[in-house]
Structures are given as C-alpha cells and as structure tokens.
Amino acid sequence: MAGSKCLLGVVVLLLCVELGYSTVVVTTCATTSTGDGTTTGTGTVTCQTSGDDTDNTACTRPAWAYTSGSDAGAWKETGGDAKWGCSTACGTTDNCIKCAPTAGCNSKDNLYTCPHYKYVDNVWALQTDATATVTCDPFLTGASIQTLNTNKKCVALTPDAAFNLLPNYDSQRSCNLPTAVTDTSCTDTGTQCRTCTSGDACDNLRYCKVGTATTAAAYAALPWNFCTTASAKCTRPVIVNGIPVDTAMKFGCLDENSATCTDTTKCSTCSTTGCNTWPAAGSDYVVKCYTWTWSDDKWTKSSSATACSTPTAGPLPTSCSLPKDRNTKDGFTAGGGCGACTTANAKTCLNTIAEKNSGYIPTASVLGILLLISLLF
C-alpha cells in the first residue's frame, strides 16, 4: 500500500504540472509580534516564496546602521517604511535588507559585534569603555536578495592606518561589509588593516612598531604593523642616553622581517600590542653610583651604590665620578658621584664606569711616601 501511495503522489504532481498549476514553496521569516514594523523580530511568519505569489520571494527586515556622530546603531524603521516579514514588507530599499528564503535569515540574532575604532586626531583608537564594541549587520541594503553570510568578519586597524581604508565608516563602523573595505591590502594577513572574525580573534591581534630608528623622532615616523600571530612578541633596541646600544637592532615583531633579539644587553622584548615604544628618559638604563660627601675634612663614600636620579633635561648619566684627592674639598661637588666630571673639574675629578666610583685614589702625600719607599728598597 505504501508503494501505491507514493506512486499516486507522483501521478498527482505530474498532473498538476501538465494542467499548468504551480507548486508552492513556503519558508518561515522573522517578523514582529505586533506586525507593525516598529519592534525587533520576535515572531515568525510563513511566506510563500514561489508559485502564484511572486512578490514574496525573500525575507526582509529593517537594516541596522549608524549615523554620523553617534555610537549607537539602530534599525532603519523610519515611519514603518521597512518591516519584518516577507519581501512585500520592504518599502524603501535603502532602509531594508532582503535575504534568500531560508528559515530565519532575517532574524535579529544574525547581528554580530566587532571591536570599535574611532578616528581621532588622525589616529585610529581602539575603544575600551562602554562603547568598546559595535553591532554589525551581515547584510547590505538594496533591492538585491542576499544569501546569509555566516563568515561574519570585522576590520581591525593599526593606529596609523589610512582613513580611506574604511570609506563607509560613518554608516558601517568597523564591520566588514562587502563595501566597507576598498583597499586590497585589508585582508586576513594585512599589515595595517586586517579582517578578523568577531570576538577573541579581533581582540587579540598584536601589532608592533617596525623598522630601524636611532632617534625618538625617527622612531615616531616608523609604521605600526600587525604581527603574523596574536602571540608574537614585540622587540626593540635597548636605549641608553637617548641612543640605541646597537643601532643595527630593529623594532618589530620578534623573529619577523629580521627583527631578532638574542642579546638582552642590546635589545628587549615585550608581550602586549604596541609595547615596543621608545623609552622615557632613564627608563631603560639607570646608572648606580656611590655618593661622596665632605665631612671631617675629607671625602667619604656611601656604603653602597644607589640609582642616580633622572634629570629633567640634558643627557642621562651613564657613568660615575669621584674626587681624585679625598683630602681636598675644592674640585668636587658635595653629594656627587652620579655622572661624569664637569670640564671645570677635569683635573680634580675622575670618571669611572657605573658602580666603580668607590676606589681609593692615592693623594699626593701618599704617592710621595710610596716613591721614597721604592728608592730605599
């Protein structure tokens, strides 16, 4: 009997086609609970997507978009012009999207989030406050029927990326819609503009300063580039007295583009995005010196070497000093020891490397005694 029922069904279908009747295909689209197009899609409606009713060939809903100067996106439901439901609910095409008739293709749950960037003072700044993310629509507005894009992506930018990499920023923010990015360099492996999936894949992207610089000004001109992996470290040369210890050392993502670091006296590494910055004065290398004070008619050194303070101007101390004659007050500064001898005290002061200005320097009288002993014996 079961076989005969199937056969009967085939016969009926062939008869319908032969007589000119259309088969009917239906799908379920998201709609509003009230049907007035003023609330987000919370219900469902069954649409006829083929057959006699040719107007309902897709699901539709209001588009999600941003307006210039506002960080809060909204449904484009102006005047109820764009509604949730079958394609006849789409009024002005710029206010709604149409998607291929698959169940729930127009659901509000298809929206996704991306990290939020703002372009301030010619720099892209990743937001970290309450507006740290933006809501993205995977569809474009227009009359064309689109297929739901399950590969929902965002756009990530380095601080110095060109503004025109996001020409539709005002309406799309950092959502990677098909028209969001016009520059072919913005790819999954782009150096300054990179596409990424929402969530950790975007939040954990690592970028570093890249190139060679021997001055702070030259460093500022270097570009920020994304690293190959999110776990990459940044590297830079050790800076002493405003100059790299080894001028051949590069800024960059560690072990990428010849940016290596094997000698920690010449380079340093760090593990957060954008961390290989030019150091503040004195932060890389703080000299320790013994301090000399004048007391009881002689110079006396401190019991241990202490870090020299960083001057607010001028060169950083990279060496130490001590009085040549511990019994002569003139020619050395009380509490001194940090930094090299001044030109005026060149004859009464001795330079040493860091932490070595504790040595005893014989006075003239002692030298005379040593000379006499050498003559007698």
Image (cartoon, helix red, strand yellow):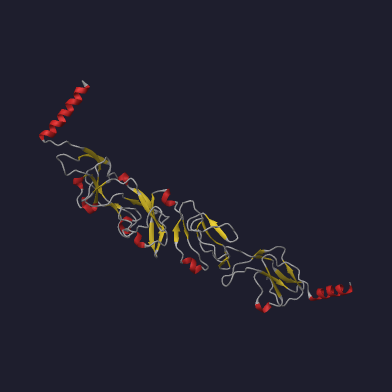
Residue shown at 18%/46% (left/top)? 88
- In terms of depth relative to the viewer, which is nearer, 44 or 219? 219
Q: Locate the C terminus and report the quarter of the image it occupies.
A: bottom right
Residue 374's image quarter? Answer: bottom right
Residue 29 in the image: state x and y as whole percent. 25, 41
Image check: 316 left or right of 16? Answer: right
Q: Quadrant of residue 348?
A: bottom right
- Residue 73's x, y, as percent? 31, 53
Question: Which residue appears farthest toward the right when viewing the image?
Answer: 376
Q: How many marks?
A: 0
On the question of residue 337 being in view, the answer is no
Residue in view at x 38 percent, y 59 percent: 118
Image coordinates of residue 8 in percent, x first then y, are: 17, 26
Residue that protrudes farthest toward the front in the picture = 258
Q: Position of residue 316 (x, y in %)?
A: 59, 69
Q: Residue furthest left?
A: 19
**For the point 73% across and 76% down, which residue is it?**
329
Q: Is residue 305 visible?
A: yes
Relative vertical location of residue 303 with respect to residue 377 in this rendering, above or below: above
Give the residue at the far bottom of this rendering: 344
> Quick one: quadrant of the N terminus?
top left
Describe residue 27's horizontal placement relative to residue 170 as left or right: left
